[in-house]
Image (spheres, rainbow, N blue to C red):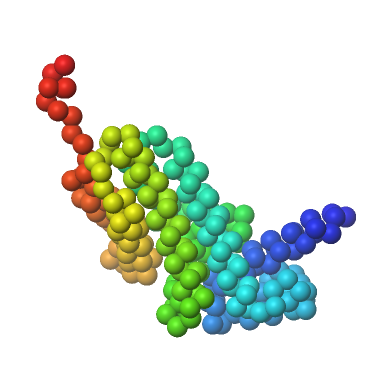
């Protein structure tokens, strides 16, 4: 039998995986603690031992799920040498075939877990300061990923000086807008449209800051 601490971590992961699936399928308003307990194979009392309320569980589920999403994208970016190309490294956001990660149902594509969780959080954030803080943290994590690529582009001389924080905020907003249309209005916003749109938009934003090779340097 695993040690107590290890068992606690296993149970916690089991609960979070069940919560991701339940919340993604049915939404925060419809899911009960009893539903999540049943999905996790626990009693309701066993569930509340780890999370005293559905709100506490949902907040932790949101944080845990998206911390893994951001870790995955950081790993993807780390494998791309060109800092400009790192700005386009998020095509998984528009791939309904991409398998889920460790947290959640591996049979359910990643996007069909992440987007419902995000939109639930956004809905709650409109009237709740704690959920608004969660959403702002989600936004800030995207900005950090993009800003790091822009900062490196400037440092390596690929891009001229700019306010990389402001530019990262604009690019993250482009991604969010395109993703929302792609997920919620798929009939008019295909996978191809999503990828082509965000690439074209980002290229237009950074084009004025791209350094060109001087004619004299080309000749030499």
Q: Is residue 110 left or right of residue 155?
A: right
16, 161: nearer the viewer: 161
Where is residue 220 shown, x and y percent of the image?
16, 16
218, 1: nearer the viewer: 218
Where is residue 28 shown, x and y percent of the image?
55, 78
Q: Is residue 143 left or right of residue 108?
A: left
Residue appearing at x 38%, y 65% in the figure: 183
Q: Is residue 117 left or right of residue 34?
A: left
Q: Is residue 207 above or below residue 46?
A: above
Considering every residue shown, the one lying at the far right of the view is 1
Q: Is residue 205 above or below residue 52?
A: above
**Does any portion of residue 188 appear in the rendered image?**
yes
Residue appearing at x 16%, y 22% in the figure: 217
Q: Kindly indicate the quadrant of the structure image that contains residue 214.
A: top left
Q: Kindly indicate the quadrant of the structure image that contains residue 11.
A: bottom right
Looking at the rendered structure, the number of numbered marks drawn on it comes to 0
Considering every residue shown, the one lying at the far top of the view is 220
Residue appearing at x 59%, y 61% in the figure: 64
User: Quadrant location of the N terminus?
Assistant: bottom right
Where is residue 54 shown, x and y percent of the image?
63, 78
Q: Is residue 31 above or below residue 4?
A: below
Residue appearing at x 28%, y 66% in the figure: 188
Where is residue 24 shown, x and y percent of the image?
53, 70
**Does any portion of residue 93 appear in the rendered image?**
no
Q: Is residue 91 above or below residue 22?
A: above
125, 89: nearer the viewer: 125
């Amino acid at each position: 039998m695993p040690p107590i601490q290890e068992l606690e971590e296993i149970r916690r992961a089991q609960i979070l995986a069940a919560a991701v699936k339940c919340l993604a399928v049915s939404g925060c308003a419809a899911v009960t603690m009893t539903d999540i307990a049943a999905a996790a194979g626990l009693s309701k009392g066993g569930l509340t031992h780890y999370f005293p309320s559905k709100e506490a569980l949902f907040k932790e589920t949101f944080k845990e799920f998206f911390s893994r999403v951001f870790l995955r994208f950081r790993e993807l970016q780390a494998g791309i040498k060109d800092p400009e190309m790192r700005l386009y490294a998020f095509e998984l956001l528009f791939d309904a075939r991409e398998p889920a990660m460790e947290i959640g149902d591996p049979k359910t594509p990643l996007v069909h877990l992440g987007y419902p969780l995000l939109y639930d959080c956004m809905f709650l954030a409109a009237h709740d300061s704690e959920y608004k803080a969660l959403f702002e943290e989600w936004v800030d994590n995207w900005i950090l990923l993009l800003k790091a690529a822009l900062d490196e582009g400037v440092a390596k001389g690929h891009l001229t000086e700019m306010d990389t924080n402001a530019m990262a905020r604009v690019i993250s907003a482009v991604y969010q807008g395109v993703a929302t249309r792609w997920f919620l209005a798929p009939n008019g916003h295909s996978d191809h449209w999503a990828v082509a749109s965000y690439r074209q938009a980002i290229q237009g934003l950074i084009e004025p800051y791209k350094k060109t090779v001087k004619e004299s340097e080309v000749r030499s």
